[in-house]
Amino acid sequence: MEELNLFSRRDFLGKGSAALGLSSALWSGGCESFYELINNRPTRRNIQELSLSDPIIKTYTNAVAAMKKLPASDPRSWQGQANIHFNKCTHSNWLWLPWHRVYLLYFESICRKLTGDTKFALPYWNWTTHPAVPDAFWNTSSPLYNLTRVASQTDQADPSYIGAGVIQNILNEPNFDLFASKPPLTSDLHSPGLSTTGPLEATPHNNIHGFVGGDMGAFHSPLDAVFWTHHCMLDCLWAHWNMDLGNANTNDPAWVNFAIKDFVDENGSPVTFDVGFTPLLPLTLYQYEPCSLMQGGGQSKITQNKKTLEKFLRDGAPSKLEFVRRFESREPLTAEVGKPVTRAIKVEAGALRDVLEGGPRNRAVLTIADVDIPEKRDFFVRVFAGKPGILADTSIDDPRYAGSFGFFFDETMQMSHAPEPGGTGRPRTGFLVDLTSTLRKLNQAGSLSPEELDVSFVAVPYGQRAATGHLTLQRLELGVARF
Ligand code: C2O
């Protein structure tokens, strides 16, 4: 019975229950029922595997209907939940993962309370295996429908940001700051300005928001029921990266000890949740149906013992992303949709040797800095590295393809940072693109120039949209990391 250390009765009834946001009444049956609860924790399932009449879809539909009936002043209402996101969401920094995990947890418990379906678990949208908005969201008379979407039922998200190879590269990131976005640079966690977004957030996360469009394209996105299934997918990938692939979260106290205070429980009472407990949630309160194509293969030894796994999740590890060498290009760049632009970064001969010949913990990371958040976010950006000659339609199967990013922002949000003096007046952000696997591929093929790296950007419209936005950025930095 002593399966998990955390949940010795004393520990649990003390800090644990509060942090896990559970009423102790739930556990009054004692230790045994407590373990039973963990072992029978609900499973968040792949929505595409469910028929439209599945009880999970029914409960979700009923819950959304019930929330839409509550007055907007009630934070448990449909509008109230979206307002929390609009006013408080944290993005472009490493708190976005735990913040949205806790958001999902309480949203799910509100769904349970309002429907009486106490075992309900949110479904997730696996966009890698099903790149169109799932069928459950297209019945125009259902509360799960949202008429602001720009994507149609048959539009498919682009493999540049949700394809199996792209997601696999992200799951291969061995470093938390790279996987989860960097620490916030300001105390204003709600503002994406000046911070640096990692590939999980910049690539599938931001781009699915942009691809679906309408409400999903800005900070009231939880008004579209698709939002919650999108974030469950991201949450599943995070859990998978930790628990199956054996990657540690950061142990930085600024992350572990951060208290999230933005949510209410199923009764509408405000709750506080410590980030340090969030890694344990998929081990204790819910689980996922496999969401990754890497599941099943090459799993970590850590998963084989629950106690070891629990300790691993609680302890975390140092994650600081430090560059031992940096090479820069400070030539500003503007790329119109469909017109590729290339910049060369001068590199000292031999500086990349460890990256090209080293192990998984030697990385070459491109920081795309001081990027204007465009007013028209109707496109995403493909990034290529290596030799020039990239065309608007160069395929992502080209060995030079390194990744993609998109923007997630709300134009009506008050930015607390004044725009850069002498800048374009737009708020700015930054992105990280891991070039390691691309450079290794090119090197093996003998097509990597030793003293110069060409980086190309292609702005691509979402779906069939006639995009008019453009990409503007000030600085590129190639960093050589070892951790
Ligand atoms: Cu805070 Cu994907 O949203």
Image (cartoon, rainbow, N blue to C red):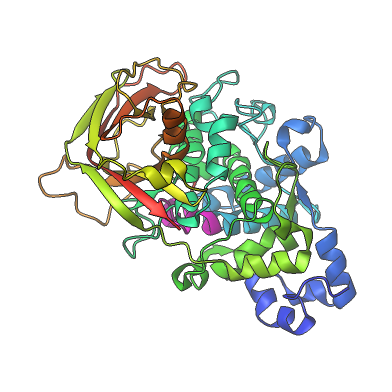
Judge left or right: residue 87 versus residue 152: left
Vertical arrangement, residue 249 with respect to residue 369, above or below: below
Q: Which residues are magenta?
A: 83-99
Q: Residue at x 66, y 44 (%)?
A: 64
Where is residue 319? Give x, y as percent.
47, 62
Vertical arrangement, residue 251 with respect to residue 429, above or below: below
Q: Residue at x 87, y 65 (%)?
A: 36
Can residue 21 be seen from the camera position used here? Answer: no
Judge left or right: residue 45 versus residue 405: right
Magenta residue check for 187: no
Q: Nearer the viewer, residue 215 or 98?
A: 98
Where is residue 298? Give x, y as percent.
70, 45
Where is residue 436? Give x, y as percent.
44, 40
Place residue 367 in its image quadrant.
Answer: top left
Magenta residue check for 98: yes
Judge left or right: residue 9 versus residue 63: right
Q: Residue at x 53, y 42 (%)?
A: 170
Vertical arrangement, residue 173 with respect to residue 333, above or below: below
Q: Nearer the viewer, residue 166 or 72?
A: 166
Q: Residue at x 67, y 70 (%)?
A: 311
Tell me the quarter of the image containing the N terminus: bottom right
